[in-house]
């Protein structure tokens, strides 16, 4: 049986089983020596519009319109047949690679990039989720933090689900990305997938029904790790808690905070609190940048195609805070500078970052109440609602190109996520949706 390393899935295609030989580990074997194990449905449940299916088996056997493969962000298909990426190349030849090459043009793209290709003979589409760069591996010098890998996987997941809806596809199958060499916590990865699915379910209209599969190839791995957790997960979702946080007076943050007020698993609520702090840090950073004259644009501060991480944003925010002119006449700028230059709040923010990484990796984390207190202290959140009493009025419409409102379909407000050759991408924090604004028109979007 082919092994699932957590970054992909592999195995013999259902369409090769009727042939004289079966492909296993790249060798041609007598089919009588290969024990074919059909897809085993472990759990199937229905939300309002989305049906969730948990299964053990071969991702390529899932009866779906589309599948997801994890990739490095050079999007060169793997030669390892134990991975989904390697199986795509082996099953479908060079045609998929040619499509990927046409999209990348030989460039390494940023983590969190999703590319789409045709699905060859078996599927309508294949989604290739690039969650780390080719030289970015855990334990290597300069490697990303665990939480950054985790967030990149979450971003890819949400992009795939949004594309499934936009293209009118009815089903998609995911592997469990990130629990192999990256050793991210299976429980948190599933919580992240479920959160993305539930968010999508809430946006779907009557008549829009989607089937989302989570397929794990290695039966032993499923039963020893995820399989055991599945029962805990189902029970935990009946024993959920609520995390409430003080209103900031910033609509983007307050809409995200409203999600924290919904019942959730405790560990996921902890992660969302840390995510709240990350979004608030971005607001602080971009507000500070607006206090610099002339105000720099994303292209001069961040690399093309790369979403700035928690650490990058924090470092930039502190740098701008130190350089900020005295009494800058920009909403929040002076207050944010004082926060970032304060040693106590800086220590609290670093502690929040530590909790992010502990949660992503499955290490012991602080109790929910302590993380909530750290978040509030690191941001001095109790003072945000009073900023307008001493500063000018908050007008997010003036925050281009850092915060913009999309023109369609319903005017969602997004925070800068990354810039690309022809567009700037914006993230809607409360839904995880992404929209693009052409770079040459970003400054005119309101």
Image: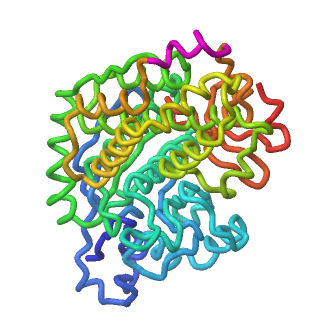
Residue 284: % across, % down? 56, 33
Please determine whether, in this image, residue 161 is positioned above or below residue 243: below
Q: Is residue 375 visible?
A: yes
Q: Residue at x 46, y 26 (%)?
A: 256
Q: Nearer the viewer, residue 312 or 67?
A: 312
Q: Which secondary structure class fits the magenta region best? A: helix
User: Quadrant of the image for the C terminus?
Assistant: top right
Please determine whether, in this image, residue 313 is positioned above or below residue 181: above
Quadrant in the rendering for residue 57: bottom left
User: Residue most toward the front?
Assistant: 326
Q: Residue at x 48, y 69 (%)?
A: 136
> What is the basis of the colouring in this image?
rainbow
**Residue 169 within the magenta-colored segment of the rendering:** no
Q: Is residue 65 visible?
A: no
User: Quadrant of the image for the N terminus?
Assistant: bottom left
Q: Residue at x 48, y 82 (%)?
A: 79
Q: How many marks?
A: 0
Please determine whether, in this image, residue 308 is positioned above or below residue 413: below
Residues shaded magenta: 383-392
Residue 224: % across, % down? 14, 60
Locate residue 180 relative to residue 134 in the image: left or right: left
Residue 334: % across, % down? 60, 27
Q: Nearer the viewer, residue 344 or 237?
A: 344
Q: Nearer the viewer, residue 56 or 287?
A: 287
Quadrant in the rendering for residue 115: bottom right
Locate residue 63 relative to residue 54 in the image: left or right: right
User: Residue most toward the top?
Assistant: 389
Q: Residue at x 45, y 74 (%)?
A: 87
Quadrant in the rendering for residue 247: top left
**Residue 387 within the magenta-colored segment of the rendering:** yes
Residue 254: % across, % down? 48, 20
């Amino acid at each position: 049986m082919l092994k699932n390393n957590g970054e992909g899935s592999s195995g013999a295609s259902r369409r090769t089983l009727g042939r004289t030989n079966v492909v296993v580990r790249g060798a041609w074997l007598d089919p009588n020596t290969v024990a074919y194990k059909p897809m085993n449905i472990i759990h199937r449940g229905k939300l309002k519009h989305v049906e969730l299916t948990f299964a053990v088996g071969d991702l390529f056997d899932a009866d779906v319109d589309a599948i997801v493969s994890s990739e490095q962000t050079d999007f060169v298909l793997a030669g390892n047949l134990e991975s989904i990426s390697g199986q795509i190349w082996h099953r479908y030849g060079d045609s998929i690679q040619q499509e990927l090459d046409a999209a990348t043009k030989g460039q390494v793209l940023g983590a969190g990039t999703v590319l789409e290709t045709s699905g060859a003979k078996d599927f309508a589409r294949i989604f290739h989720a690039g969650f780390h760069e080719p030289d970015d591996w855990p334990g290597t010098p300069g490697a990303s933090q665990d939480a950054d890998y985790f967030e990149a996987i979450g971003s890819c997941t949400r992009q795939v689900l949004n594309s499934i809806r936009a293209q009118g596809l009815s089903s998609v199958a995911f592997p469990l990305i990130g629990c192999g060499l990256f050793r991210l916590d299976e429980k948190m990865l599933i919580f992240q997938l479920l959160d993305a699915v539930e968010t999508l379910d809430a946006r779907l209209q009557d008549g829009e029904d989607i089937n989302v599969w989570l397929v794990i190839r290695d039966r032993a791995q499923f039963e020893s790790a995820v399989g055991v957790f599945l029962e805990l997960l189902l029970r935990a979702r009946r024993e959920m808690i609520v995390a409430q946080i003080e209103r900031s007076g910033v609509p983007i943050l307050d809409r995200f905070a409203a999600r924290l007020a919904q019942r959730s698993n405790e560990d996921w609520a902890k992660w969302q609190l840390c995510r709240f702090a990350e979004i608030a840090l971005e607001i602080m950073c971009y507000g500070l940048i607006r206090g610099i004259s002339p105000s720099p644009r994303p292209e001069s501060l961040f690399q093309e195609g790369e979403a700035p991480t928690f650490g990058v944003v924090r470092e930039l925010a502190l740098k701008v805070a130190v350089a900020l002119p005295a009494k800058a006449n920009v909403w929040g700028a002076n207050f944010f500078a004082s926060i970032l230059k304060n040693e106590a709040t800086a220590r609290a923010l670093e502690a929040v970052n530590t909790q992010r990484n502990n949660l992503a990796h499955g290490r012991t984390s602080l109790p929910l109440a302590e993380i909530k207190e750290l978040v509030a202290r690191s941001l001095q959140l109790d003072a945000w609602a009073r900023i307008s009493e001493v500063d000018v009025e908050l007008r997010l419409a003036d925050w281009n190109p850092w915060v913009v409102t999309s023109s369609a379909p319903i005017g969602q407000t997004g925070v800068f996520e990354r810039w690309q050759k022809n567009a700037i991408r914006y993230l809607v924090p409360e839904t995880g949706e992404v929209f693009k604004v052409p770079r040459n028109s970003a400054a005119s979007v309101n």
